[in-house]
Amino acid sequence: MKQPRRLLFLVVAAARAVTDPLLETAIAGGQQFVNLDIRFGPDVYRIPVGVNATCEEKRRHLQGVMPEGMLGQGCTNRACAALVTLAELLPSCAAYCEAAMGDAKLERTSTVEPGALWRGSPGGAVTSLKGQRFEAVARAFLGAHGYASAGGAAEPLAKLFEEQNRFDPKYADLGEVVLYELAHAEARVRPPTAWFDDLRTVGWHRMPGADRLSLFPESRVAQARRALEAVTGHVRFNFLGGRGTDASTRLARGWVERFALAHFRADDVLVFTDSWQAHAPLGPFDRTLDAAQPKWNPKLANNVSFIRDAMTSPARDEWVAHLMFLGRGRPPPPSAFRDVAADQLMRVDASYVATLCSSGATLAPAGDNAWSRRFYEAILCCSVPVVQRFEHAGRTDADLELGYRYHVYDPAKPASAYGYERDWATRNWHLFANHSTLLSPASVEGFECPERTFSSVPV
């Protein structure tokens, strides 16, 4: 499927022209500042940074002069955008940017719809920029902080904003919306009235609030249980997912490669689903180039136009109308939207689930947000999640407070520190089943995660 054209921060030529040698030359020449040229749409912006400033100081300066509109590459705030820009233009700051991205991912954008409560938003209040005119935003950007544009009026930039739907929060939690509805449909339980009120007042861009736990349909639980029953051999670790779907994700997931290089053995599983065509394997555990290895990546398969069309279609309207009458003894009617949601928008590859369910631990790094659905998918498969920091262990504050058990990455720890803990896995599974599904307690009572035996395959 053709992917949407992305809004790029940088031009390759600019990245090549503004490098660390340029800073060294400026220092040798006694200059106090060096210009960073950043292409944004039709224009090039020149931002001076101190040559002797630390990476932290450079990042703070960039963050201060980059308006909210200059986002993209998976970023929803200026902190993230500044880190992406700095890492691309000044390679010597890449390690700093990767480490700082964990904090940047916890900051939330003000470009979402009112009422979309993000974790960390003050008092649950979010100021929306959605209603602002694109032209006004573009003009404000062109004159921001006195930095001159290399050319171009506001209108072309406004057009670029509009083409990219720059203020539409497309990916972040849209899947949670669909999963929430599928869970109610499968259980034949009508969603709360507030859900329909939000759909009417906010529209398809709405994201579940920070006061609502993530919710998965019964079919996901059943799929994981079947995969657990079919397991014939166990591995210690796995990661199947995108590495560089966008620039911010690439920084947020840099630790995955270091973990794999340090701890994965030959029978563990590493698959990057978005960069395999130009990938150099990291070791015998790296299956990225294996032609027989499925590489389903939902963000690459579902472009913005497809998502928008599905979420604004008449089939979607019929689906929402059906949800309003759940619980009245009526069998669920056929639904074109439900088929699209299950088979495309929220599809989960069977081989992906099988790998998670055979693994003692699953790496669950942050993605374009400070959490990943992989965290919950690992729990369903009785695999202990490994996260970079505790704030990544759930979508909302409510999820974080449930008490899930997981490992936190520490480069000083040996592989044995990330071992499979059966009691953790079982506790996690029941917490999830009782709080993030609509299954009855009786239907999950007595479930135990499996014992796992790992081979002695060398690294």
Image (tube, grey):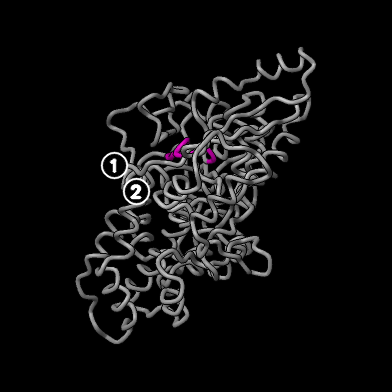
Q: Is residue 121 left or right of residue 332?
A: right
Looking at the image, residue 187 lies above or below residue 370:
below
Label 2 or label 1, whichever comes before in sequence order: 1
Q: Quadrant of residue 412?
A: top right
**What residue do we see at 53% from left, 30% from top?**
257
At mark 1, the secondary structure is loop
Q: Is residue 432 left or right of residue 67?
A: left
Q: Which mark is residue 74?
A: none
Q: Is residue 343 left or right of residue 268?
A: left
Q: Amino acid at mark 2?
A: Asn
Q: Amino acid at mark 1?
A: Lys
Can you identify the residue that label 2 sits on? 303
Q: Is residue 44 visible?
A: yes
Looking at the image, residue 53 lies above or below residue 185:
above
Q: Is residue 196 left or right of residue 343?
A: right
Q: Is residue 236 visible?
A: no
Q: Position of residue 291 (x, y in %)?
A: 28, 28
Looking at the image, residue 112 lies above or below residue 332:
above
Q: Is residue 294 magenta?
A: no
Q: Which mark is residue 2?
A: 1
**What residue do we see at 42% from left, 72% from top?**
438
Q: Position of residue 261 (x, y in %)?
A: 54, 26
In the image shown, does 47 or 258 lie closer to the viewer? Answer: 47
Chain part drawn in magenta: 236-248
**Marks 1 and 2: in contact by CB < 8 Å?**
yes
Q: Position of residue 366 (x, y in %)?
A: 55, 46
Q: Position of residue 221 (x, y in %)?
A: 38, 60
- Mark 1 Cα within 10 Å, few/some/many (few <14, many 20+)? few
In the image shown, does 197 or 4 lie closer to the viewer? Answer: 4
